Image (spheres, rainbow, N blue to C red):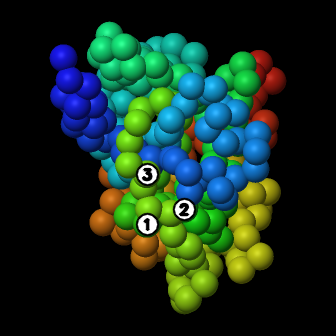
Amino acid sequence: MSLISPVQTFFEELHRAGLEGVVLGRHYDSRVEAELRLASLAPFARSGLLLVSGGSTFFEHFLRQKREEPDPLDAYTRRLVASLVEPLRREGIRVAVRHPFWNEADPLPFQRIARAAGLAPSLLGLDLHPRFGPWVAYRALLLDLSLEESEVSNFEPCLGCAAPCIEVCPVGAVSRAGWDAKRCFDHRVDEGGCAEGCHSRLACPVGAEHRYAPPVLRYFQASALACSPKSKNPNGAA
């Protein structure tokens, strides 16, 4: 059987799941340090695929299927990616999967990988995707799909931007110097601010049409607070 059909199906299923793939190849290799080049990540790799969730679709699927389990989003992501790559493996395509989660055995610096792939840093502490803007998250890295590489560009949207993200932050946690995480979290924990979403992220003009839906915004604002030591009671419950 031709390998074209399962690869096409794989990308169709990615799209339905709310995932996009940034293909990594020789241009990526030329922009990244040796230990993060494809052959260092997997000796058999001919190319790689940085999987990102763009917009609300992925997270809306997750919220509908969420289980009561430790790290539910990470667990959901692992199950989903495993189900997506299984047909490729059945066709004899070797696939190595890596995730950007804190509990990975050998975590990779996904932001450095993404920067070499052409994504841009922002004032918000988030990377910007050319289409999705700040409404994107890294989910997985796949290796050994022989694919045409995504275009690598010098995408720097913040340089010429009026930076509405700075003006709308209620506590001045965003500036040209970057994101003040402590000031942001203190405001959210001590005053209950921004529970409906980050004002600065919502003000970013890049990829504005892909903003997360309100239930997704509320879920992730609450989840981020649960990770803050200040928000936990003596028993460790959020």
Q: Nearer the viewer, mark 3 or mark 2?
A: 3
Distance between the Cα atoms at labels 3 and 2?
12 Å
Task: Count how many numbered circles sit on residues in the image.
Answer: 3
Q: Quadrant of residue 19?
A: top left
Residue shown at 64% from the left, 34% from the top: 39
State the mark number for residue 149: 3
In this orientation, does residue 86 appear?
A: no
In what element is the residue under mark 2? loop
SS for tag 3?
loop
Q: Quadrant of the C terminus?
A: top right
Residue at 61% across, 73% down: 169
CB under 8 Å between discs 2 and 1: yes
Marks 1 and 3 in Cβ contact (< 8 Å): no
Give the side of residue 145 with respect to residue 227, left or right.
left
In this view of the protein, can residue 58 be seen by the observer? yes
Closer to the chain start, of discs 2 and 1, is: 2
Residue 142 position within the rendered picture, expressed as x and y whole percent measured from the top left: 49, 31
Q: What amino acid does circle 3 point to? A: Glu
* Quadrant of the image containing the N terminus: top left
Distance (Cα) linking label 2 and label 1: 9 Å
Q: Nearer the viewer, mark 2 or mark 1?
A: 2
Q: Is residue 204 left or right of residue 11?
A: right
Q: Identify the image quadrant of residue 93.
A: top left
Which percent across, then down, holds residue 139?
A: 50, 36
User: Which one is nearer the viewer's eye here, 211 or 227?
Assistant: 211
Q: Earlier in the sequence, mark 1 or mark 3?
A: 1
Residue placed under numbered mark 2 in the picture: 118
Q: The residue under label 1 is which amino acid type?
A: Pro
Q: Identify the element where label 1 is drawn.
A: loop
Q: Which residue is mark 1?
A: 130
Residue at x 48%, y 30% (from the top left corner):
144
Q: Residues within 10 Å of mark 1 (few under 14, many from 20)?
A: some
